[in-house]
Amino acid sequence: MARTKTTSKLLAAEAVSGAKKAPAKPAAARRRTRAPKYTRDEITAIFERFREREPEPKGELEYVNPYTLLVAVVLSAQATDAGVNKATRGLFAMADTPEKMVALGEDKVREAIKTIGLFRNKAKNVVALSEMLISEYGSEVPRSREALERLPGVGRKTANVVLNIAFGEPTIAVDTHLLRIGNRLGIAPGKTPLEVELALEKIIPDAYRLHAHHWLILHGRYVCKARTPDCGRCIIADLCKSPDKRV
Ligand code: SF4
């Protein structure tokens, strides 16, 4: 097997000292090894509890069609759903199709969403993505991740939310809540949203995939909160193996 530079250095150091020390693992690898393991039955039990409590979970963003859903999700980056809804009620009353949004123009879009963080850039993206929908997709929201990700302001997370909610695809959009829960509970450890998304896809049984994203968001937003998890109210506390558990 070919030796990497790092391996060769370690072996050289070992030869000098004469001691057989195990090479130190990088921090990420140590974190991963420490993640608690869950059996398939335990994972199933966790998601079954979520399903029993909320069989048809819904997102909190308001929209009237796939296009306004796409716009609302683009606007929701680094903003609360409540804050986005406040702004989009007025915006969508004026423009609920790509054509109307382009006709409204960037200045008016910016004015309508000025209460949302990063509104200047977001207004630009909303108009630009509307133009692209008109010119390349017949004014329809495309049903593929690749096509969605080509739109200005649309990344993998936004594409996954739209595919899930508008088209019923079993995608898992990893936001800050899912990233935290995947790592805190150890069910899907990963340093990046993509790592956590792929880990969740691997462990969540098919029967729960469609709603997994919403269940985990709601759990993270209202129970397994960032600063202080509310373990006393947690319906999966007996299954949770997190070192942060406080029950
Ligand atoms: S027991 Fe606590 S840490 Fe574990 S999932 Fe529930 S709220 Fe989160």
Image: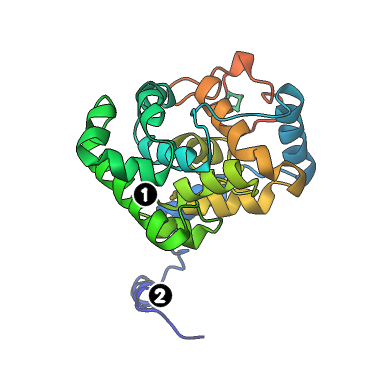
Q: Is residue 123 above or below residue 24?
A: above
Report the residue at 41% width, 52% height from top: 155
Q: How many labels does the image show?
A: 2
Report the residue at 25% width, 45% height from top: 124
Q: Is mark 2 on a helix, strand or loop?
A: helix
Report the residue at 69% width, 46% height from top: 204
The circle on residue 130 is: 1
Which corner quadrant of the image does residue 85 belong to?
A: top left
Mark 1 Cα shell of 10 Å, populated few (<14), some (14-19), many (≥20): many
Labelled pair 1, 2 in contact (Cβ < 8 Å): no
Q: Nearer the viewer, residue 118 or 133?
A: 133
The circle on residue 7 is: 2
Identity, as a three-letter code, of the amino acid under mark 2: Thr
Q: Is residue 167 left or right of residue 103?
A: right
Report the residue at 35% width, 78% height from top: 5
Q: In this view, does 159 lie to the left or right of 56?
A: left
Residue 80: percent from the left, percent from the top?
A: 39, 26
Residue 25: percent from the left, percent from the top?
A: 45, 59
- As measured in the structure, the alpha-carbon distance from the residue carrying label 1 to the one carrying label 2 is 52 Å
Residue 245: percent from the left, percent from the top?
A: 57, 24
Q: Can residue 227 be seen in this view?
A: yes
Q: Is residue 118 visible?
A: no
Residue 77: percent from the left, percent from the top?
A: 36, 38
Q: Dividing the image into four equal quarters, which quarter contains ligand 1?
A: top right
